[in-house]
Amino acid sequence: MNNAAIEVIKLLKTYDGKKALAGISFNVKEGSCFGLLGPNGAGKSTTMKILSGLLEADGGSVSIFGREIRKAGNAIKDQLGYVPQSITLYEKLSAYDNLQFFGEMYGVPKSELKQRIGEVLEQVGLADRAKDEVTAFSGGMKRRVNIAAALLHRPKLIIMDEPTVGIDPQSRNHIFEMIRGLKKAGVTVLYSTHYMEEVEALCDDLAIVDHGQVIAQGELNEVLERHGTQTVYLELHNGGRPPALAGVNAPIQRGRGWTIETDAPLDVLAGWAQACRSASLKVSQLEMVRPSLEDVFLIMTGTTLRDN
Amino acid sequence: MIIHIAKKEWKLLLKEKGTFFWLLGMPVLFIVLFGSILGNVSSSEVTVPYVDNDHSDVSRSFVASVEEKSGYKLEEKQSAEMQAQIDKIRDGKGTGLLVIPGGFGQSLQENGGKTIAIELYREATSDSTIAPLRAVLENMANAYRETKIDKALADSGQTAEKREQTLSAPFTIADRLENGSGYNVISQIVPGYTVMFVFFVIISMLKRFLRDKESGMTARLRSTRMSPVSYLLGMWLSYLVVALIQCTVLLAFGHFVYDLHIGDPVAVAVLVLLLALCGTGIGLAVCMLAKSENQGMAFTQLLTMGGAVLGGLWFPIDMMPQAIQTISRFTPQYWAQKAFQDIMLRGVHLPGIVNSLLVLALIAALALIVAMLRYKRFMRTALG
């Protein structure tokens, strides 16, 4: 399971003199879900398109299951399913007809196609809507058919470019469950998003991309520990300012409470507890806070994902 | 792959009712509309009022004779209404008025008497409407004159044979129709609108190619086994079949509804195939050249409407100035229409339309080359 499904080495791409990719490198383990996290315009979609064979890189190399994609041709296409960011379906056709068309394009044998369409529709929870025109579907249902189209030929690698943009929570959960199911079945998933909570919920490994470069990568916990800062959070009952502690950073207001970033969170936690008791302050909440990918991104780029 | 792409496209076309209207409903509507208007012009009866101030048997016989020879319906008005009729003409509400003066009958009977004037009032813009009536009146005046001359010659003692020799015209017109079947408005309109609307298929092609490109479908399909050329050929095949069906339906409509003489069916079939190849080939080139739907629509309007006028699809090419007739030879519409009329009117078979077929094939080949050359750029822009 530890063989590399994808090896990306120093990938370069320039559009009209502007660098979209400035030497991106990362590895994706076979059977894992790998998150590519970054703000809009960071280079995620360009990377996805190069991996899917839609674009050619100006430099660097990409190997999928050990084969250089420039030389592999249809052999790689048979193992890869690409879900683009936009919904690319024919709205006037039924879900079944759309999937039949994609199945034919992926070269699924005619004898298997009908059965495969039934299976993928079951997988995305739309088996009962097979004959309905896509135009009658909600945004989330369209996204699910959009994903189903990439599963018809049983690919070993699914590349999903922001598959949950603008959908309802029910469809999002359905897609998450589906991805977990694919992972269980040994399918490698490369998942791009600018929602950090999606990466935290789904991915084993990740790379954070900004301005066409990978700024952090590794296993989720490892990245958080390596780049994140431990934080202690305190919220007083009366909403007032907590007592200052000697030898640590000054508290910063966050929402209704206050935080202190520190390398010694237990000492700060104990210090704040003692200080509040001494001053007879009533505490609503006092806890250590796990660093988030948002914090990591802020630390490494000086901006938040939303700012971008 | 090619047939799968074409099959998908046919499914989409069947779902889009507007396409049927554009490609079949509109041309049928045009054929019916213009067929009804232009087809009835020669047989329509124009009514012209007349005032008979003579009230004689001769004047009544004259009116009946004019009606019979001209095909006009003459409607009698009383003398008192004459001024009102003239006012109507002056106001542009009437086309003409024939006035037979008093003493008309007597003048005709008094052989050698003074010349009497029949008045024909007309509106300035109705020359073409009144011209046939005027020609009939002049012919009748000539006939009366000949009768007078004949009577004078007989009175001078000439024999019937000699008089006939003297009065015979120096030349006659022998009308010889060389076409296999006669020209009529339908033989202009049906092939004309068939050719014109084949080029309208470009609009449907343009919309599909650009929608696929903008929605990301073209890009997504590149991640499948589909080769780029399959996409181009699949789309072409689908619209080629649409154009073939369109031509067949329109020509069949002309044949069964308007009794259009089709001529050699094999020649027509080959011509329709070449026409469809040409129209859809140009369509592919336009789709590859157009940077936006608006630009593509502008190209298409120029090709369809400009080609229709220059190609002689709306009216016979002989009616246009020589320079335009020369330019028209550079349009595929001209060659298609010419070949249709060669087959339908002149009874020509396949060898007789080879030149037209070659021109259509050449234009189709050139358009395909342009499409192929531009396809890489189209794909590049589709992939972003």
Image (spheres, coloured by chain):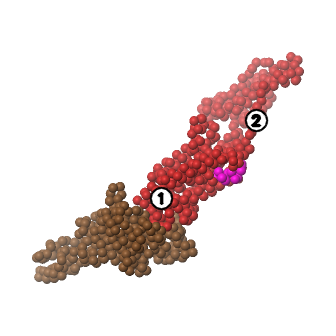
Chain colours: A brown, B red
User: Earlier along the polypeptide chain: callout 1 or callout 2?
Assistant: 2
Give the position of the C terminus of chain A as an image quadrant.
bottom left
Residue B269 on the magenta span: yes
Q: Give, as a single range, the part of the protein colored magenta.
A: B261-272
Query: Residue B179 versus residue A20: which sits nearer the camera?
Result: A20
Residue A263 on the magenta span: no
Q: Is residue B340 left or right of residue A196?
A: right
Q: Chain of mark 2?
A: B
Q: Is residue A242 left or right of residue B207?
A: left
Total count of labels = 2
**Picture quadrant of residue B327:** top right
Mark 1 surroundings: few (<14), some (14-19) or many (≥20) residues within 10 A: some
Q: Tag on residue B175?
A: 2
Q: Amino acid at mark 1?
A: Arg
Provide the residue designation for mark 1.
B211
Q: Amino acid at mark 2?
A: Asp
**Helix, strand or loop under label 1:** helix
Q: Is residue B250 left or right of residue B168?
A: left
Q: How far apart are the two marked residues, 1 and 2, measured between alpha carbons? A: 58 Å
